[in-house]
C-alpha cells in the first residue's frame, strides 16, 4: 500500500518545514546550546529530511534501506546510552512532553530513532521481492513485513500517537497562557528578531513536534 500523492507531498512538506525549524533554532541558539540539545536538534534535522525523502516515490531510494536502518539504529543506541547514564547519575530528565528544542528528551529520541530504523528495515526487499518491481510496500519494500516487525511498528506508532495527543494538550495550554499573559505594545523590533521569536515560541516548537510525530506514526502504520 502506498500513500496517495497528495498525502505524500503534504507529509514531505511538513517534514522539511520541521527540518528548517530545527536548523533555524540550532543556528539562532548556537552560542547558548548544551551539546545534548544541539545533538537533539541535529538528530531531528536528519530524521525530518530522511522522512521527507522516504515518503516521496522520486526520492525514497536515495538512502539504501540497510544503511538507513544501521544509521538510525546507531543513533538510537547513543540516546539509550545517554538515558542509562543520566539515570545512573540520578539526574532528573523531566517530561518527554512539552519540551522545546525539537524534543531533546533522550527517551523520545531513542524511540523516534527506533521508529526510523524500523521503517528502513521494512523497506529492505525480501528475496522474493528482489525480482519484483521494487515498489515501496506501504512506503517501502515489496513483500509484507514479518509479524514481529509489524508488532514493533504498531507499538512505536501507538507511542507516537500518544505523544502527539499529549503534545497537542501542552500546545493548547501554552497557547492559552500566552493569550492570557500577552501584554500591550512595546518597542518596534527588526524582522530578524521577530523571526527569532517565532522560532523560539513554545507553540511553534510544540506544533512542529505534534505534526511530525503524527506523520511518523502514519508512516509506521502504512508500511
Image: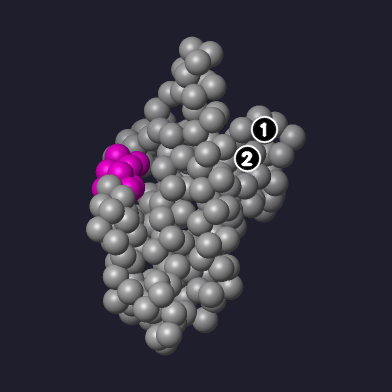
Q: Callout 1: few (<14), some (14-19), or many (20+) C-alpha neighbours within 10 Å?
A: few
In the rendered structure, does residue 210 fall within the stretch colored magenta?
A: no
Residue 33 seen in the current view:
yes
Residue 35 is tagged as 1
* 40, 177: nearer the viewer: 40
Q: Toward the viewer: 183 or 67?
A: 67
Q: Is residue 211 visible?
A: no
Quarter of the view holding residue 218 = bottom left
Q: Is residue 214 left or right of residue 23?
A: left
Question: In which quadrant is the C terminus drawn?
Answer: bottom left
* Residue at 49% across, 12% down: 90
- Give the number of the disc on residue 19: none
For mark 2, what is the residue?
A: 39
Horizontal side of 184 relative to 42 (left or right) equals left
Quadrant hosting residue 222? bottom left
Q: Which residues are magenta?
A: 156-167
Residue drawn at 48 percent across, 48 percent down:
113
In the picture, the quarter occupied by the N terminus is bottom left
Q: Secondary structure at mark 1?
A: helix
Amino acid at each position: 500500500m502506498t500513500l496517495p500523492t497528495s498525502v505524500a507531498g503534504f507529509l514531505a512538506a511538513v517534514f522539511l518545514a520541521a527540518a528548517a525549524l530545527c536548523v533555524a533554532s540550532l543556528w539562532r541558539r548556537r552560542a547558548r546550546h548544551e551539546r545534548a540539545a544541539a545533538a537533539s536538534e541535529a538528530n531531528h534535522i536528519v530524521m525530518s529530511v530522511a522522512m521527507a525523502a522516504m515518503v516521496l516515490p522520486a526520492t525514497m531510494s536515495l538512502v539504501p534501506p540497510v544503511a538507513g536502518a544501521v544509521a538510525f539504529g546507531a543513533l538510537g543506541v547513543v540516546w539509550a546510552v545517554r538515558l542509562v547514564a543520566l539515570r545512573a547519575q540520578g539526574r532528573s530528565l523531566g517530561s518527554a512532553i512539552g519540551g522545546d528544542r525539537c524534543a531533546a528528551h533522550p527517551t523520545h529520541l531513542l524511540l523516534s530513532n527506533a521508529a526510523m530504523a524500523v521503517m528502513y528495515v521494512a523497506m529492505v526487499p525480501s528475496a522474493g521481492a528482489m525480482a519484483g518491481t521494487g515498489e515501496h510496500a506501504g512506503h517501502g519494500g515489496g513483500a509484507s513485513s514479518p509479524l514481529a516487525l509489524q508488532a514493533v511498528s504498531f507499538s512505536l506508532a501507538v507511542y507516537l500517537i500518544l505523544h502527539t495527543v499529549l503534545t497537542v494538550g501542552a500546545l493548547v495550554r501554552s497557547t492559552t497562557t500566552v493569550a492570557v499573559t500577552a501584554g500591550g505594545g512595546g518597542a518596534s523590533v527588526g524582522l530578524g528578531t521577530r523571526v527569532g521569536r517565532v522560532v523560539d515560541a513554545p507553540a511553534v516548537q510544540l506544533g512542529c513536534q505534534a505534526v511530525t510525530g503524527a506523520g511518523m506514526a502514519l508512516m509506521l502504520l502504512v508500511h
